[in-house]
Image: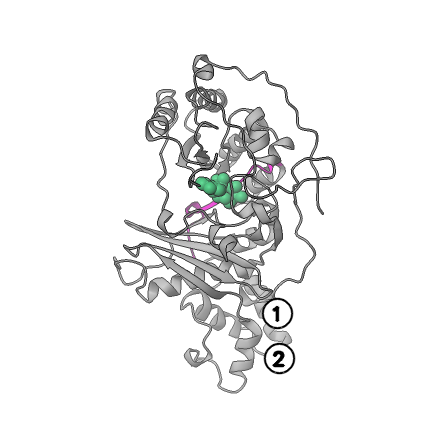
Amino acid sequence: MIDGMTSPTRTSNTPMPSDAGDRRQVRPAAEGWEQQRTPEGRPLLQFASPRVKQPPQHLADLTLAERQAKLKELGLPAFRAKQLSTHYFQHWTTDPERMSDLPKAGREELVEAMFPPLLTEVRRLRTDDGNTIKFLWRLFDGALVESVLMRYPGRITLCVSSQAGCGMNCPFCATGQAGLTRNMSTAEIVDQVVAANRVIAAGELGVTEHPDERVTNIVFMGMGEPLANYKRVMAAVHRFVDPAPEGLGMSARNITVSTVGLVPAIRKLADEELPVTFALSLHAPDDELRDELIPVNNRWKVDEAIDAAYDYFRKTGRRVSIEYALIKDMNDHAWRAALLAKKLNQRGRGWVHVNPIPLNPTPGSIWTSSEPEVQDEFVETLRAAGIPTTLRDTRGKEIDGACGQLAAAE
Ligand code: SAH
């Protein structure tokens, strides 16, 4: 389904505190590309994936029970499901040579049936210190997606993609510019993590801290809107948290689902018995600006999105994150920090923290990051109002930082 939006409401009754007049207000606009629009002239929103072929079924698409059923269908004993799962989820291998616990006869055919190759590496970029690696993957149908692997002291984070392209059409995001190609399958999402674990095990990510290292944290902040691919993303989350050998045995709280604010899906997520970390990409506290910055705001307004985030906290007890890319003269005004703090404090205390992140800059464009003193003032305004706030670093700037840039360049 390709979907237009309801009429943008241009009610400009946002309170404008005293510094509003002193600072420039740059308005969002597409530069160097044309934002796809509906026949009525509104930014196009694609909530549903085009009906294109999905990749072949892979072991990671299935629950353990489904794997057992499939093996039975193939005329094999059900316990082979656990053996194959152990190879994939604990040893990160799909190499039949390494599966000596399986009978030699028919082993290759079995592996072919359960582990069709899903990701082909096209490019790999690495920072000088080796602590950040960006992968560009080609999927079976030629679609390109990215993931980014980052070593921090005591943890290793993988930023994964959930869709090829994205239908949310945010004008500052490289991924949105080409629209949505298709949803990724569960196994395509999971295989990014398994591939990263292989790279870590091979000692290729910076300086190894201990021998059993693997991905400890996953953020759905790569390409795509995860909540627009809800079922497959949730199945992938299950593979991440299911105990080995059914899954990777990770902790749900170390998995972050980030969204532009699809309110009904946020509410559904809160009802899952999975305490994942939830992040809302807000980027503006006022509807007037957010309508332009995040086109889906025309469907679900700032207050509805914040209410849904607050209810996520109430249901799960998990503190939620607000993501806020600081864009020079566009959304970085101190009055906006104050308005954001006010809206968050209105709901309660201790339920949220804010992560401002300097926009990945496009020099010479309206899409550039805020000045350092403006960033500091934004952070201080939030903190002074009692909102825990952490300015995020932009990892991997030197390697085409922002997700989607690599795929776009290819
Ligand atoms: N669609 C989801 C997840 C993918 S984007 C979402 O919007 O949350 C992950 C984060 O990167 C979002 O907060 C998004 O707004 C942000 N982002 C996109 N382009 C960026 C850029 N050029 N610089 C900094 N952050 C960006």
* Stretch of the chain drawn in magenta: 247-263
Reading the image, the residue beneath label 1 is 69
Q: Is residue 247 in view from this perspective?
A: no
Q: Which residue is drawn at 39% across and 65% down?
A: 198
34 shown above or below 354: below
Q: Disc 1 to disc 2, how far (Cα)?
A: 10 Å
Q: Is residue 143 in view from this perspective?
A: yes
Q: Is residue 190 shown left or right of residue 204?
A: right
Pick whichever, 34 or 181, lies toward us. Answer: 34
Report the amino acid beneath label 1. Ala
Q: For the residue labelled by badge 1, is the local secondary structure a helix, a strand or a loop?
A: helix
Q: Residue at x 47, y 64 (%)?
A: 122
Q: Are marks 1 and 2 in contact (CB under 8 Å)?
A: no
Q: Which of marks 1 and 2 is nearer the N terminus?
A: 1
Colour scheme of the picture: one colour
Q: Does the magenta stretch include residue 390?
A: no
Marking on residue 124: none
Reading the image, the residue beneath label 2 is 75
115 shown above or below 237: below
Badge 2 local density, few (<14 within 10 Å), some, or many (20+)? few
